[in-house]
Image (tube, rainbow, N blue to C red):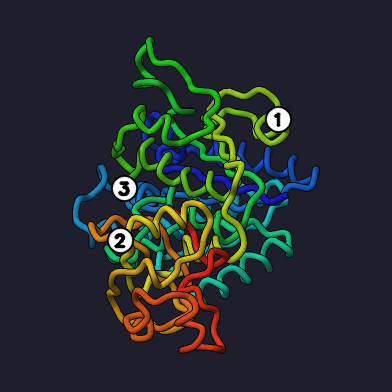
């Protein structure tokens, strides 16, 4: 059973501003105990900039991107040294994996990374994953490690995801206020987004809103997610016992197989615009037919992925096309029988329902 754990920068920081070595050691001890029960782990760990600041003795987090990237370069080596040493005290072996968002936009790189994770896990190694902050540029970043955790969930299909947060769960208000109540279970992310705010901590980049936006992806995959504090026993979370924190239940209708890749990995190469009737048909589980198409934008080939939108620009679906953009332009408004005569060797649907995902 694979478990994905995300550890934020502020979890790794003591109240005095030092790196929390006791927490890392405690995490290793708990993981060792659970590995003896058959669990396997991948850890997404923030904290490179914080580690760089502590290593170099700087005061506070710099504002310039260059300074942050340079500190991340120093800090990543130091952070991995700490993980390697403290986990090694418990007989655990770790590896470093640095990723950028382009890994999840390129199918070949995605498969290579997936195979590497698979081999590391098979060898009994615990991958420690972080965004490659040192070389990241704006268009290739995840924004924060909550979204990196979500996309790793797409790649690795863990049985459980645990986000260790300073908040210790989702509350109806500021957790520091007495009237705020802990929300122990969530079935629909939309119902609780109103409670979350986008915040930036001294060393982190996310907030509860970021966590819930990422949780929408994890929820859609049919994976349970727990948001907890650093003292919450991992055993309780994984074995269905009561725990202090928030459990976000998995979707009863998860996105699986090739639809998962269409939804989250394959970038759209164009847009097909449809009428309202086509949208209603897709919602009912039908395929996209040429008769409901109004226009095509972009240049794409047969088998590539495109977005599907209404005339007002509202994107409501994504899927793999059976025809190129030039072919679809010639098919707009034609019936299934007319398409069969023009392309007798092709399926008549522009996008078959098995290759389509609704947003």
Q: Nearer the viewer, mark 1 or mark 3?
A: 1
Q: Which of the labelled discs sits on residue 200, or is there none? A: none
* Residue underneath mark 3: 57
Secondary structure found at label 2: helix
**Can residue 106 be seen in this snapshot?**
no
Q: How many angstroms separate mark 2 from mark 1 (CA)? A: 40 Å
Residue 341 horizontal/vertical position (percent): 49, 88
Q: Which class describes the residues within 10 Å of circle 2: few (<14), some (14-19), or many (20+)?
A: many
* Residue underneath mark 2: 69
Compared with residue 44, is residue 232 higher up or lower down, i.e. above or below?
above
* Residue underneath mark 1: 240
Which residue is outermost to the right? 37
Q: As drawn, is 73 to the left or to the right of 150?
A: left
Name the residue at 62% across, 36% down: 26
Q: Earlier in the sequence, mark 2 or mark 1?
A: 2
Q: Which of marks 3 and 2 is nearer the N terminus?
A: 3
Compared with residue 222, is residue 208 higher up or lower down, i.e. above or below?
above
Q: Which class describes the residues within 10 Å of circle 3: few (<14), some (14-19), or many (20+)?
A: few
């Amino acid at each position: 059973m694979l478990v994905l754990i995300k550890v934020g920068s502020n979890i790794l920081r003591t109240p005095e501003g030092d790196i929390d070595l006791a927490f890392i050691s405690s995490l290793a001890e708990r993981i060792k105990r659970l590995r003896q029960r058959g669990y396997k782990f991948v850890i997404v760990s923030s904290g490179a900039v914080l580690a760089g600041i502590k290593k170099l003795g700087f005061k506070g987090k710099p504002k310039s991107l260059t300074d942050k990237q340079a500190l991340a370069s120093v800090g990543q080596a130091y952070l991995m040294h700490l993980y390697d040493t403290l986990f090694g005290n418990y007989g655990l072996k770790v590896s470093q994996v640095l990723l950028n968002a382009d890994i999840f936009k390129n199918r070949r790189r995605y498969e290579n990374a997936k195979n590497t994770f698979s081999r590391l896990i098979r060898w009994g190694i615990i991958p420690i994953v972080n965004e490659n902050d040192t070389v990241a540029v704006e268009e290739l970043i995840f924004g924060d490690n909550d979204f990196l955790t979500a996309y790793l969930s797409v790649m690795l299909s863990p049985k459980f995801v645990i986000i260790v947060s300073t908040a210790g769960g989702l509350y109806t208000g500021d957790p520091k206020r007495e009237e705020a109540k802990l929300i122990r279970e969530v079935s629909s992310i939309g119902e609780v987004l109103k409670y979350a705010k986008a915040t930036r901590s001294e060393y982190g980049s996310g907030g509860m809103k970021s966590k819930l936006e990422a949780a929408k992806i994890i929820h859609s995959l049919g994976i349970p997610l727990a948001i907890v504090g650093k003292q919450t026993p991992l055993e309780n979370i994984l074995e269905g016992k009561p725990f202090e924190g928030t459990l976000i239940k998995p979707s009863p209708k998860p996105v699986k197989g090739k639809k998962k890749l269409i939804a989250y990995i394959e970038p759209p190469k164009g847009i097909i615009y449809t009428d309202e009737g086509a949208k209603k048909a897709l919602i009912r589980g039908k395929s996209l037919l040429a008769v409901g198409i109004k226009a095509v934008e972009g240049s794409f080939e047969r088998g590539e992925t495109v977005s599907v939108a209404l005339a007002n620009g509202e994107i409501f679906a994504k899927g793999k096309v059976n025809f190129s953009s030039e072919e679809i332009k010639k098919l707009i408004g034609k019936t299934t029988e007319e398409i069969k005569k023009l392309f007798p060797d092709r399926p008549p649907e522009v996008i078959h329902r098995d290759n389509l995902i609704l947003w």
